[in-house]
Amino acid sequence: MITPQQFTSLESAICALFGEETRIEETSRISGGDINEAYGLMLTGGKCIFMKSNAKDNLSFFTAEAVGLTAIAQTKAICTPQILGVGTDGERAGYSFLLLEFISGKNRNRNYWEDFARQLSEMHRASTTGLATTGKYGFDCDNYIGRRRQVNTGHDSWISFFRECRLEPQFKDAAQYFDREDWRRIGRFLDHIDEILVEPEYPALLHGDLWSGNVITGNDGGAWLIDPAVYVGHAEADIAMTELFGGFPPAFYDAYKEAMPLQPGYERRRDVYNLYHLLNHLNMFGRMYLPEVKRIVR
């Protein structure tokens, strides 16, 4: 796995990437996101780059994101912002940062959603050799789903991976929300999950957090992927996530299914895949997500 270039200060990163005479001329705060702060940095000569920052101890957020973007880019199926580097700045109350290509937000191409669907299907069909080194499913390292750690221990079975590395850790962290009867249902649900999920026809690299906020219009007018939580799994888990918070236009789903038909019974499995994300939101944001979690388990 290729790791990003790492710097010991923002100043040294700017000089190493763009020349010793380059300085930050203007910093603009960019809204969006609830985990990191985001900025546009205008450099000497008029070039603009994008920076995310967080507490110094959270550098692993950005190294994991860079590794995920690299894995997607290496499929050569769909675009991601160019990674410039990661690093930390300051001795004590410093910060960590991720530097990326600045996305200008051009107008969308005419067949934006259809092209995106076909590109995503190509990413899902790309080789996953070397991405999950101890099994067919998982990833070479753990990463993050939102601000919470995502366990990617390798498994040879997709069903056991999803049970043990996706649902069980989230249920454990949400223990305070469930009573004895809930746990009886949860236990039965997990014991019988192999009656709902199916093994995929082949392993696929997943974006892992594929909702509309993580698909942006890139500098070529096409759909680009950002903020990944990558791992190797069943492609339909990505498609399920697209439907959780509002969904994409019908043109996207029509084009995706034409390029890569879903296995029979997907509609029943969709809620199980999205249970992972609902549990993660329950653990991050609180009990507003509890009724939907309980509904799916029932």
Image: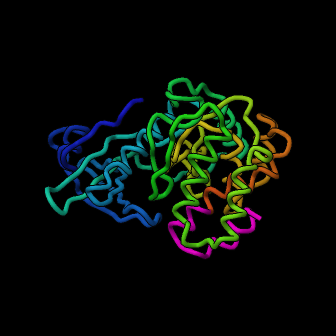
> Quadrant location of the N terminus?
top left
Stretch in magenta:
279-298
User: In the current view of this chain or complex, which residue is farthest to the right?
Assistant: 264
User: In the current view of this chain or complex, which residue is farthest to the bottom?
Assistant: 288
Using the image as rendered, state which of residue 27 and residue 1 is in the foreground.
1
- Position of 4 with respect to 9 (left or right) is right
Measured as percent of width and height from the top left, residue 105 is found at 52, 53
Residue at 70% over, 64% down: 184
Up the image or down, 128 lies above or below 168; here it is: above
Residue at 54% over, 73% down: 286
Is residue 281 in the magenta section? yes
Measured as percent of width and height from the top left, residue 42 is found at 30, 54
> Quadrant location of the C terminus?
bottom right
Is residue 18 in the magenta section? no
Q: Main secondary structure of the magenta part?
A: helix
Q: Quadrant of residue 6?
A: top left
Using the image as rendered, state which of residue 145 and residue 33 is in the foreground.
145
Measured as percent of width and height from the top left, residue 97 is found at 30, 52
Using the image as rendered, state which of residue 283 and residue 230 is in the foreground.
283
Q: Quadrant of residue 206?
A: top right
Measured as percent of width and height from the top left, residue 2 is found at 39, 30
Residue at 35% over, 48% down: 60
Residue at 15% over, 60% down: 92
Report the colour scheme. rainbow
